[in-house]
Amino acid sequence: MQHTSTKIYDYLKRLSKAQSATEYLMTYSWAILIIAIILIIIFRIGIFNYSSLSPQTCIAESGYYCHNIVLLTNGTLSFTIGQMVLPSIKNVDVYFVPANGNLDDAAHTYISTFENDQIVNIKIQLPTTAPYPSSYSLGTSITGQIYISYTIGGITHYTQIASLSTKSSGSGNVIQPLYIPITLTNSQTSNTPAPFQQMINITESNYAQYITYNSNFADFEYTYLNGTIIPAWIESNQTGNIITWLNLKKGISANSNIIVDLKFEPNTNLLSSSGTSGIGEAPQLSSTYAEYDDGGDVFNFYSNFRGNTLNTSKWKIYGAPSITIDNGLTLAATSGSWMGIYNSVSYNPQLYINDFYAYFTGLDSSNGGPTKTIGWEPGGLAEPSYNLGDASTTDYTLWNYNNNGAATTITGGTTSTYQIWNLWTTSTASYLSLNYGIPVSSSTDFTASTSSEIGIGGAINTGESIKVQWFRLRAYPPDDTMPKVKFGNIN
């Protein structure tokens, strides 16, 4: 009896364990099933589809350029190409060959000529038959190669110039960023300094349907080909020309070029003072002084005299000037004497150009002689010294401090409004120009190659003043020649 009871107990115990296991499996099976269904749904909508995550890239072969790929939902594929291999080729076909296809499957378009260093925007309508996708709905991916064909000496050549990977990013009505590739060519035998400040003049009429710029809105910026923002600064917008400056961190090598993009973002304000996004502008251009000024990120030394106090981390006082800082600098004299402000950090004057945006009041020879102003000032505002105008004659006078006061007067210009003055030094002379023009004054008095301070001031007499809104130092271009700027086609 005892034995039989034990068997029954063991049986019931095993039965209880089996029931628990069944319940366990049932519970977690439902959980696993739900997870599986979720994974299937996610997989079906393409989240795990590698091709839908593929980046938009165009990798060019050596000597060729490919960038700015856009694939629309109507099957229009656009991209920008360039070549620096052949001097000039004519009757050129551009092909897109899809992956797993060949030239017989290629979609193509025709361009008449393809010059060396030319940038061309290409648009190709892709079919919807194999090996192409059956549709180009949002997110559809496609990869392939770009070829060109051309004829030389009666022989037709087919050359692969790039490999492309992209996906559909919108319909033909979607506003896409627009790009202008710009080739910057340093034809000199020496590298530019690094960093290097490159001037680019945008003619607004050439891009009237794309560009929007006023004091508080700009829809453009500059980028490298990998999309990285280039610190840039708008200097002026006059007579339909927007003068901009770029800070090229690595400069441009001798006898070579680089390509950057001028990017338009319609309906987007890209003005920014950060230096890492958008584009900045000179302090006087915005309605709120220096609101979008990123000059400190663009130039080697920069000051906009914002606010109401002198920035003593940048400027030291020499003598006893009357200084007023009110979103700009006014420097006046309490009596005729050497005075001003200077930066105690030294720079080699043969490596930089000193620019400033200023005008002068009360400059009259009857006040005691030429007013010495702004320049390289070794030892604290000593030389070279320039009289930037005489109120009675609107002449420019170069005053050689170490030459017993001898002066050279050159007629021209005016000092009644703010203008951009440029001062630079070579191994043989120092020069002064107005608005990047030919030198209005030159001197052999100051040719130092040793490091010197930069300053604003001089022997200003009572009743005279200097007003400055910005002051900068930029790299001297090789052989005094700014790299050539060539705009490509917008795309």
Image (cartoon, grey):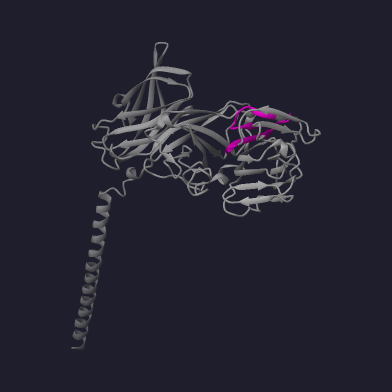
Q: Residue 263 versus residue 296: which sits nearer the camera?
A: 296
Q: Which residues are magenta?
A: 416-441
Disc tally is 0
Q: Is residue 190 visible?
A: no
Residue 205 or residue 131, whichever sits in front? 205
Horizontal arrangement in the rendering, residue 345 relative to residue 196 (left or right): right
Residue at (69, 40) in percent of width and height? 373
Residue 328 forms part of the magenta stretch: no
- Residue extending furthest toward the right: 404
Tell me where residue 379 sits by quadrant. top right
90 displayed left or right of 252: left
Residue 328: x %, y % from top left = 59, 47
Viewer can see residue 127: yes
Q: Position of residue 51 (x, y in %)?
A: 33, 42
Looking at this rendering, what residue extends furthest in the bottom direction?
1
Is residue 425 one of those drawn in magenta? yes
Please give left or right for residue 407 compared with residue 172 in the image: right
Image: 11 above or below 158 = below
Residue 297: image quadrant is: top right
* x and y percentages locating residue 35 in the rendered image: 26, 60
Quadrant for the C terminus in the image: top left
Left or right, 302 with reference to 126? right
Q: Nearer the viewer, residue 112 or 395?
A: 395
Quarter of the figure with the N terminus: bottom left
Q: Position of residue 221 (x, y in %)?
A: 46, 40
Name the residue at the top extreme: 154
Task: Determine the image quadrant of residue 124.
Answer: top left
In this view, 151 is above or below 328: above
**Which of 256/44 is in front?**
256
